[in-house]
Amino acid sequence: MKINDSLEQGEQLSQQKPTYILAIETSCDETSVAIVQDGTAILSNVVSSQIETHKRFGGVVPEVASRQHVENITWIIEQAFEEAKLRPSDLSAIAVTQGPGMVGALLVGLVAAKSLACALELPLIGVHHIAGHIYANQLVHELQYPFVTLVVSGGHTELVYVESEGRFRIIGQTRDDAAGEAYDKVARALKLPYPGGPHIDRLAHEGEEAVPLPRAWLEPDSYDFSFSGLKSAVLAVLNQANMKGQQLAPQAVAKGFQDSVIDVLVEKSIRAVQAYGAKQLLLAGGVAANKGLRQRLAERCAEIGVPLLAPPMSLCTDNAAMIAAAAFLKWRRGQFSALDITADPMLKLEEWSV
């Protein structure tokens, strides 16, 4: 529901006094609450990770994640206020991740956000999780439109063209496994701890030689991705070595796998930047913390003379500051959500556009 569709009035409100948005993020296995001023200044960003809890299961268990969100959300909200040195009466709006994500986890954040918005009589802003990852860059960089974003996380691998502020168009996406999922599955095959991404990245940098593995380029003009076949190729190489009684160096397997993933991600991203005339390439999502990916993207962007923007490691993984940054786009336009919004695990990014 749009309470006020006037961009001018939204900007006037922002000019009269600082805009303080409290945001809640509970889409997966991090419980986070942040307070951000005017969409760019982080006053607090409290994150409680559940990695140690889920590590013994080898992945996120939705029911366990939801329960821990319930246990943690109250004290995290209190800590966010303490660190920001603000009172509830100072807030301008409440933002919350509406989707995509695990429905039970999303519901915990939505209930908390609705309760705050109702009690404080403040506007509620439902936010798309991927929009948050993209606009995490706004917390540390000045964005120039149009730009292309490579989104790489546990559940998403997408190329997004952003023509103007908050206007998203998905031009490429994974057809099967996301890059992060492939990393975790290969790590499991190598008997590495969860989450597997950082361990694969570390081993890949230690490896001097790489096990040869295929690249899934798909159709010549496609910006889509596919990592399921690569994952299967890794498993086949490991099984063949076991049957022959051979021992493959995990560093060589990790390097071969990561080189294959990065080659496809980087070259399709660079091709999209050139085809769409983007002024910047943004990197977003949890896998954006991958050092090998950052390094290769930086090298290719330097070759074509286009800046690469990436958030610091602390803003790559799920956090509420990025949700507040994206929510500010809606705040400026007076585009608020009704108190009866529901969790939407399949929320579409393009439909969320401002």
Image: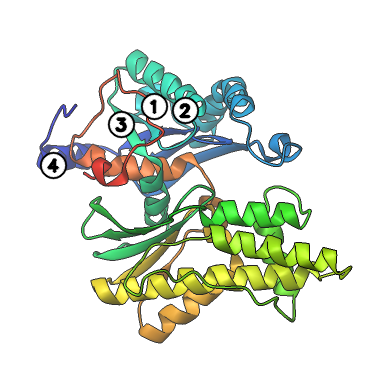
- Locate residue 287, reporting x and y percent: 55, 57
The image shows residue 344, relative to residue 129, as above or below, that is above
Dot 2 falls on a residue whose secondary structure is: helix
What separation in Å lies between label 2 and label 4 (alpha carbons)? 32 Å
Tell which residue pokes out farthest to the right in this image. 245
Residue 238 seen anywhere in this rendered image of the structure? yes
Q: Of the residues shown, which amino acid type is indicated by label 4? A: Leu
Label drawn at residue 7: 4
Residue where numbered disc 1 is placed: 343
Label drawn at residue 125: 3
Taking the spot 37% from the left edge, 52% from the top edge, the residue there is 135
Residue where numbered disc 2 is placed: 103
Sequence-wise, the earlier of marks 3 and 1 is 3
Mark 1 surroundings: few (<14), some (14-19) or many (≥20) residues within 10 A: many
Q: Of the residues shown, which amino acid type is indicated by label 3? A: Ile
Kindly indicate the quadrant of the structure image that contains residue 10.
top left
Taking the spot 53% from the left edge, 72% from the top edge, the residue there is 215
Q: Of the residues shown, which amino acid type is indicated by label 2? A: Val
Q: Nearer the viewer, residue 79 or 297?
A: 297
Single out the mark in the foreground, 2 or 4.
Answer: 2
What separation in Å lies between label 3 and label 1 (alpha carbons)? 13 Å
